Every structure is written in C-alpha cells, then in structure tokens.
Amino acid sequence: MGFDEEAGSSTNVLPPFPREDTPLITRSEHLSSQPKTFANIFIAIVGAGVLGLPYTFKKTGWVFGILMIVFVAFLTYHCMMLLVKTRRKLESKDGGFSKINSFGDLGFTVCGEVGRFAVDIMILLTQAGFCVSYLIFIANTLAHLSHTKKVLGFSPKAFYIWSCFPFQLVLNSIPTLTHLAPLSIFADVVDIGAMGVVMVEDIMIYMQTKPVLQAFGGLSVVFYGLGVAVYAFEGIGMVLPLESETRDKAKFGRNLGISMGFISLMYIGFGVLGYMAFGEDTKDIITTNLGKGVISLLVQLGLCINLFFTFPLMMNPVYEVCERRFCEGRYSIWMRWALVLAVSLVALLVPNFADFLSLVGSSFCVALGFVLPSLFHLMVFKEEMKLGVLILDIVIMVLGVILGISGTASATMEIFSVKV
C-alpha cells in the first residue's frame, strides 16, 4: 500500500503515537550548530561495536577489513541521506506532512501501519540486540578480570549477568530516563578514552612482537565481517531527529559525510592496530588482550560501567514500541521486567561478543539501515526518478537481502560452532 492511498488525507496529520526517538531526543528551541551536529552524529553512531573490530580484522584480514569499513560507511551515509531526501520530498508537497520526526513516522507516511510496524520491529530487535551485546561484554570482561572458574556454583559469565539483573530491573523501571541522558556523554568520553589507550598499547606491543598478519581471510568470512561493520555504523534511527535539529539544513549532508569519514578513519585505525598488536591471539573483546596494570584495569571497568548505565537508555525505544502496541501506550513495569529478563537470557546463551555483533548487524541492522531506506525512497520518488537511481535503489535492497541472509547464516554458524 503506497503513501498516496494510506496517508494522503487532507489533514496529513500522523497519529499521536510515541516515537522511537521521543524518550531520548527533546525538542529544543535552539537549533544545533554544525560543531554540535557533528558531535551528535558521533555520539549516535560510535558505540561498543568498535571493540569487536580488531577480532573481525583478524578473521577477514587487515586489507579486506579496511575495504569493508569504507564500503559500509559509504553505503550507510547514502541510505541516511535517502531518508532525509524522502522526508524533505513528502514535506515539500502541497499540504505536506509536517510531523515526520522519526524513522517510524516516515514508515507510516509511506506505507501506513505496515511501514510503521516494519520499522518498529527492526528497532525493537536492533536495540534489544545492542543490550544483549552490552551484557556479554560486561560479563566476559569481569570474568577475564576475576580469573575464576566458578562463583557460587555459577560460571563467571552467568554470575555477572545475574548480578546485573536486579540493578537493571530498578534502572529500567524508571518511567522517564531524561535525567540519565548525561550518562550517554560519559559513555562516549569513556569510549574515546579507552580507544586512545588501547591504540597506544597496540603500537607499543606491535613494536615488540610484530606478529604475522594476513591481508585477506577468504570469502567464507566476508559476510561475517560486513555484519560487524554494519553493527558498528548503526545509527540510522537517529538521522531524522538530528537533521530536524540542525540549524543549517542545507549543510547537513556535508556535515554527515565529514562525520562518517572521521568515524571510518577512527574505526580503521582501531581495527588495524588491534590486529597488528596481537595477530592470531586477538580476542573478541580487544580490551581483554591488554596486560595487567592500573590503566588497563580502569579502562575495562570504565567501559563496563558505561555500558551498564547505557543499557536502560538503549532499551527505552523497545519499551516505547511494546507499551504502545500491547499496553495502549501506558507504562508497564511488568512488561519492562519481562524484556530485561529476555535480554539477559539471550546474553547467557551467546558465547562470543563479536559473533553476536555480526548476527545483529547482518540481520536487523541491515534491514533497518539499507533495505527500508531504499524501499521508502523508491516508493516516494518512483514517478520521477531516473533509471540509474531506480536501479541503485533496487541494487541496495537486493544487496541488503543477500547480506542479511548470508551474514545471518555465517554469524549463526560461528556462534554455534565449537571453539577449539
């Protein structure tokens, strides 16, 4: 069902549903300058996924890893701009749609309830997947630091996940998390600081060891690597709110491109240096490769603390979707607790951090980041687009489906394979 029939009423007003961005983005009277927009883009994209890049470079080879980051960055940027152009087109129509503030709103405007549902389910699975990876990271890191095989009869990983559980129930019971938003700034400061420390350590270790490196890891790991890269660049759900709050919207595309270029260079440097330092001994969470010492301990504990407090922020879009669809938009503590329990149980079952990043990136992030933006763009511009643009949209959708199926299969096999 196209946007003409489903959303083409004379009022052009979207239903007053909560949107995935409403808990975290508040409308400000003052629009963002270019430096602030750059910082907001950086915060929206850079996350824990970067910590799995050195391990991914080990599997794919350092040359293919670089090519993979560049390709995914360019494709992500292109699809983000497709969303921006699609919204601008709809809002520029006579009697245009004036309340397209989020990805979910755009899905509703283009495809009606089917479009909103598709975006909702992808955001739900993606955000929940992020939180699963947070728990895996926290538990594996603390298990690495504790050097114990059993804690009160539990494996270290299970013990630390269940130790987090009651505290997460309390944090996730807070109806509004606006006052926890400053913690996201703390999280990014810790991420950048940790990356800097790790990269310095990598250079020092490489100068001493100089392990043998492989440039290409073979075709069998191509889709695995692409899945991790897609996860690392995930942030497309925030691009429309960020563009709305930009003062100079004509320069938003350039600002976004500069941001993506900077993040790409940072990812490449972090991934290559991590692999160069440890070679075939590179672990799925690069910080567990660091030696003993106060700085190493502080970096790892700082990352655990930052992800612990980021967990409820990232789960809030999940609660918005579930409470809107199952509780008529009302706050439900039991729904929230059940979702925290479900995320914790999944984290217990997944052994490897980077493997899970690839699974989430290949499945949900690919659909949200590539397939849906190109589909919405095609549906809105189909009457006037040139043949080349039409073909490109179709190619991206097909590529997204292929990457999604192949990458999901590859990551699933890695998760369930026996680690020797």
Image: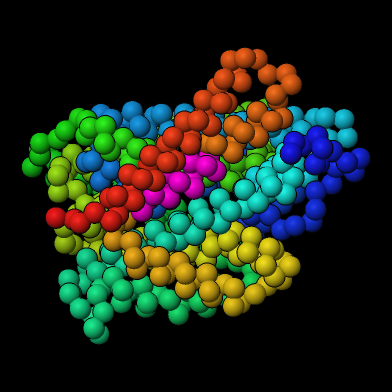
Name the magenta segment's main secondary structure: helix
Residue at x-position 74% and y-position 67%: 328
* Count of residue discs: 0
Residue 49 location, x and y as percent? Answer: 38, 49
Instruction: Specify the quadrant that holds the N terminus.
Output: top right
Looking at the picture, tell me which residue is in the foreground, 135 or 420: 420
Residue at x-position 72% and y-position 49%: 113
Looking at the picture, tell me which residue is in the foreground, 401 or 101: 401
Q: Is residue 365 magenta?
A: yes
Residue at x-position 20% and y-position 30%: 215
Residue 10 location, x and y as percent? Answer: 91, 40
Q: Is residue 205 magenta?
A: no
Residue at x-position 33% and y-position 48%: 411
Q: Please say if 318 is above or below 370.
A: below
The residue range painted magenta reads 356-369
Q: Residue furthest top?
A: 387
